[in-house]
Image (cartoon, grey):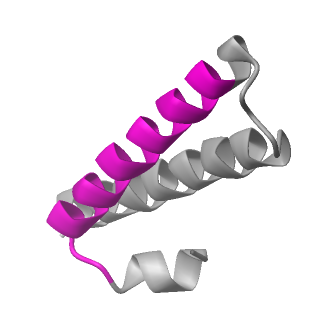
Amino acid sequence: MNAKELHDKTPDQLREELAKLKKESFNLRFQQATGQLENAARIRTARRSVARVKTVLNQKAAQAAAE
């Protein structure tokens, strides 16, 4: 999901997306620890997606505070 799609979502939807991504990240780390992870690049993608959602959430919070 790109940043443009995230900007269209509400903060509640972004928080749900963040929770989903964190759960996915945990599952990927768990799979890596047990040796079951097939695509190691998914960890990086998940981590960056979490950062992207957090960035958009912080931007929306700053924008709401400025208004």
Q: Is residue 67 left or right of residue 31?
A: left
Main secondary structure type of the part rendered in magenta: helix
Q: Is residue 35 left or right of residue 62?
A: right
Residue 19 coordinates in the image, percent (x, y): 31, 45
Query: Does the stretch in magenta take in 11?
Result: yes
Q: Is residue 64 left or right of residue 8?
A: left
**Which residue lies at the image location 73% right of the left edge and 48% below the top edge?**
42
Check the image and report above or below for 14 versus 4: above
Q: Nearer the viewer, residue 44 or 57?
A: 44
Residue 26 coordinates in the image, percent (x, y): 49, 28
**Which residue lies at the image location 25% right of the left edge and 53% below the top edge?**
15
Q: Nearer the viewer, residue 53 or 36?
A: 36
- The residues colored magenta run 9-31
Q: Nearer the viewer, residue 65 or 47?
A: 47
Check the image and report above or below for 34 versus 2: above
Query: Does the stretch in magenta take in 44?
Result: no
Total numbered badges shown on the rendered structure? 0
